[in-house]
Amino acid sequence: MNQTNRKNRTKKAALLSIGSNTVLIIFKVIAGLLSGSVSIISEAIHSSMDLVASCVAFMAVRTSSKPADRDHPYGHGKIENISGIVEGVLIFIAAGLIVFEAVKKIMEPVEIEQAGIAIAVMGGAAVVNFFVSKYLYKVAKEEDSMALEADALHLKTDVYTSLGVGVGILLIQLTGLMVLDSIVAIMVALLIVKEAWGLCRNALQYLMDKRLSDAEEQEIMTVIEKVKSDCSAQIVDYHKLKTRKSGNIRHIDFHITVDPSLTVTEAHDIVGCFKKELYEELKNTRVNVHIDPYNHPDDDEDLDIL
């Protein structure tokens, strides 16, 4: 799939998230005001943050798909990693607001009204978010979009929190313990904090150019070994393999030691073979191969930065 199709698909997925969050916020606010439930109000706050996060994701996927330019020769992929951190911070803020409201309700309990409507809204929200998050995860994995994956994680958490709030209101109706509303809201906040921490940590690691996973690097080395085997007469070895990820683009850098008698054209053709094989095996990949002549005195093993 080319970059234009990827951009259109990820944009549509992000817009779907924005639309679903907007509708759910309206219903949750109405249900919260009718019932007086702090846990439903907390869910409306959570969904409001989800809406902001969806807008951030939309802007990120739109920007990350732009081609490299003069000011950004390596592309715009890292905007997706930045958006992941922004979304994580928004979740932390939402959690703080939820705890604040819950503590206020513990001090001044409010009786739950219109419980049936409240439970129905929470159940409906859980169902909608389940299907939307499932679709976002599918697109995020296929298009390797961290921004969409973060957005899907928001909605997946919203499924659990909506169900939790609905069950909490049901328990209040059965037991008469109003404090359960605030307890459920605080539990929602703790779950959200856990989500935010994982999201921020993952996004930060890629911003700091963390290497690809062991499985991905093993796949890369398998391809390199295959090409090396096909060109065994010209290639002595490969070394200094380095990998990183920017948005959905995998960057692969390594050195090859070749027969010093090779012409520039022959060495260029060998590099082309490596790039062709890696492009075919790993989607969204950019490859940089440095050539070292065998036994060259300038082949300094201490020069680790290309």
Image (cartoon, rainbow, N blue to C red):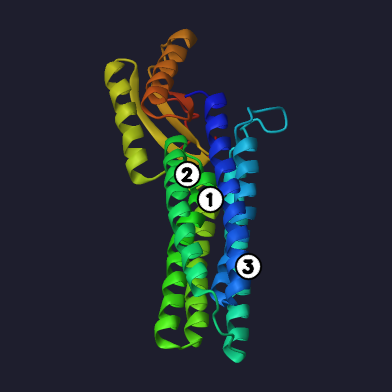
Question: Left or right of 13: which side holds 257?
Answer: left
Residue farthest to the bottom, as pictured = 107
Q: Residue at x 53, y 26 (%)?
A: 5
Secondary-structure class at tag 2: helix
Q: Looking at the picture, which amino acid does disc 1 mark?
A: Asp
Secondary-structure class at tag 3: helix
Rendering quarter of residue 283: top left
Mark 2 or 1, nearer chain start: 2
Mark 3 or 2, nearer chain start: 3
- Image coords of residue 298 (percent x, y): 50, 29
Give the residue at mark 3: 93
Badges 2 and 1: C-beta atoms under 8 Å apart? yes
Give the residue at mark 1: 151
Give the residue at mark 2: 136
Question: Left or right of 228: which side holds 193?
Answer: right
- Image coords of residue 233 (percent x, y): 29, 15
Q: Looking at the picture, which amino acid does disc 2 mark?
A: Leu
Q: Looking at the picture, which amino acid does disc 3 mark?
A: Ile
Question: Left or right of 297: which side holds 238?
Answer: left
Measured in 3D between alpha carbons, the distance from the residue under mark 3 to the one under mark 2, in whole angstroms, is 23 Å
Q: Eyeballing the image, is 74 above or below 270? A: below
Q: Residue at x 43, y 64 (%)?
A: 160
Mark 3 or 1, nearer chain start: 3
Numbered badge on residue 96:
none
Q: Nearer the viewer, residue 169 or 262?
A: 169
